[in-house]
Image: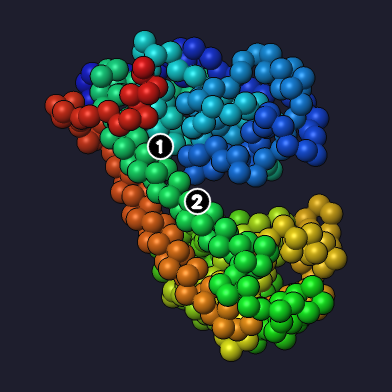
């Protein structure tokens, strides 16, 4: 039993929220074209964020019909009830969104509960333990809607709630700002690539002749001929062990330019050594690609590091550095035209996956090495900046995650501290 400060209470979540809404228990019809109306699925709710970069779209009619109970708005909190259970995200945009299946929405009563404090409470260990307990006892972890309305929330005085929320939100605002900078840098690299290799306005293009529709010196080559190795990771997963420095990554752990260390499984040193011998450890400058599921959703250059091996859902391309530059190949693989071409090398309907023996035959238009090398120098500087910001974010996340349980439980008092509200909270209160 947690000993809270004397001026804290526990309250049922439905007694301190203006709205608690579950999704309509029916799959909404989606469309295969982009609209202003997006569906929040369980896969969009992860690590405290509602990420709609990859989403499904619906018509305005469906949006209105599915939101007849309540229309989600900025700063609402979304919780997943199943597959997976207990993921929490804050809606940070003004996008037109609707709840998909197995999701819940919480909107605090601002007279007694700060919305951001509610969000961090749902992320914290006190409520997560309740959610796990309520979701146990079935093959697939699942929490019933009535149980999701009866969670016990710690309730300090509103002024303390706001100070706790302000402290944690300051970290999240910095993380979001860095994420925006990372996206801008990624867009910059993409624009340079397209200017040089799609629109063919590379440095000195005016003096280069074309032959058969391509600049002179460019060649059609197979991926196999450009790489010293094309393989994937382990085809069986070793068991998880606690407190280990060795990790195994799956496609689910991949992010835009690296892995999420928090979601990776830790394994024993002996299992790690076996998998290293089996060729499942990536080397610096290898290109790692999402092979299974949303193939090519993530493609990045591995910048090196110890203690990591891969499962078979990730493919390893080891480029021949005398023939092709890693960042050029990464940018080429990220192009929609490449993904469309990939359909010939993919099998499976429920879980599409790249067939490597066929993928090796894919032909690519490869520029001169001098031009690729020049691009590599420009692109690597951009990706270096991205890697730096990602490292900063990892440190911010680690600090926030250490503070969160101590603040939400009252073990770390903020009552007598003079805390400035971050800009995002000021906007919400305006």
Q: Is residue 90 above or below residue 399?
A: above
The image quarter in which residue 114 lies: top left
* Disc ID at residue 183: 2
Q: Residue at x 63, y 27 (%)?
A: 97
Residue 282, horizontal then vertical, whole percent = 55, 77
Residue 35 can be seen, yes or no? yes
Q: Residues within 10 Å of mark 1 (few under 14, many from 20)?
A: some
| 29 lies left or right of 75 | right
Near mark 2 (Cα within 10 A), the count class, few <14, some 14-19 or many ≥20, is: some
Please identify the quarter of the rendering in which residue 289 is found. bottom right
Query: What residue is shown at x 63% (from left), y 61% (from top)?
Result: 194
Q: Which residue is at a point 65% across and 13% down the rendered structure image?
A: 69
Q: Nearer the viewer, residue 409 or 217?
A: 217
Q: Tell me the CA gap for discs 2 and 1.
A: 28 Å
- Residue 410 in the image: above or below residue 429: below
Percent position of residue 347, x then y? 84, 63
Q: Which mark is residue 124?
A: 1
**The C terminus: image quadrant:** top left
Nearer the N terminus, badge 2 or badge 1?
1
**Residue 42 or residue 31, whichever sits in front:** 31
Mark carried by residue 404: none
- Quadrant (top left/top right/bottom left/bottom right) for the N terminus: top left
């Amino acid at each position: 039993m947690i000993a809270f400060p004397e001026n804290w209470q526990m309250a049922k979540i439905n007694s301190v929220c203006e709205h608690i809404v579950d999704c309509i228990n029916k799959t909404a019809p989606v469309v295969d074209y982009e609209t202003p109306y997006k569906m929040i699925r369980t896969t969009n709710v992860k690590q405290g964020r509602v990420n709609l970069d990859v989403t499904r779209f619906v018509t305005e009619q469906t949006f209105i019909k599915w939101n007849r109970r309540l229309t989600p708005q900025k700063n609402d909190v979304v919780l997943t009830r199943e597959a997976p259970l207990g993921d929490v995200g804050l809606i940070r945009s003004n996008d037109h969104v609707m709840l998909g299946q197995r999701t819940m929405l919480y909107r605090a009563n601002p007279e007694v509960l700060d919305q951001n404090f509610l969000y961090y409470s749902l992320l914290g260990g006190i409520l997560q333990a309740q959610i796990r307990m309520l979701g146990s006892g079935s093959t697939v972890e699942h929490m019933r809607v009535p149980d999701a309305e009866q969670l016990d929330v710690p309730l300090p005085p509103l002024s303390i709630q706001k100070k706790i929320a302000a402290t944690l939100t300051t970290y999240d605002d910095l993380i979001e700002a860095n994420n925006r900078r990372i996206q801008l840098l990624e867009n910059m690299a993409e624009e340079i690539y397209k200017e040089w290799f799609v629109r063919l306005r590379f440095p000195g293009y005016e003096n280069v002749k074309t032959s058969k529709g391509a600049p002179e010196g460019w060649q059609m080559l197979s991926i196999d001929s450009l790489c010293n190795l094309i393989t994937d990771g382990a085809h069986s997963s070793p068991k998880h062990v606690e407190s280990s420095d060795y990790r195994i990554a799956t496609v689910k752990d991949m992010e835009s330019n690296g892995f999420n260390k928090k979601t990776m499984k830790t394994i024993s040193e002996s299992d790690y050594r076996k998998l290293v011998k089996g060729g499942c450890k990536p080397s610096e400058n290898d290109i790692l690609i999402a092979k299974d599921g949303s193939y090519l959703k993530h493609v990045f250059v591995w910048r090196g590091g110890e203690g990591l091996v891969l499962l078979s859902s990730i493919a390893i391309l080891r480029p021949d550095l005398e023939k092709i530059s890693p960042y050029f190949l990464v940018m080429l693989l990220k192009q929609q035209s490449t993904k469309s071409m990939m359909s010939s090398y993919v099998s499976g309907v429920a879980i599409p996956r790249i067939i490597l023996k066929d993928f090796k035959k894919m032909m690519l238009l490869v520029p001169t090495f001098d031009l690729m090398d020049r691009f590599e120098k420009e692109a690597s500087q951009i990706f270096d900046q991205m890697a730096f910001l990602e490292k900063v974010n990892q440190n911010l996340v680690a600090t926030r995650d250490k503070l969160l349980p101590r603040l939400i439980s009252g073990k770390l008092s903020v009552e007598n501290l003079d805390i400035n509200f971050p800009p995002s909270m000021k906007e919400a209160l305006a």
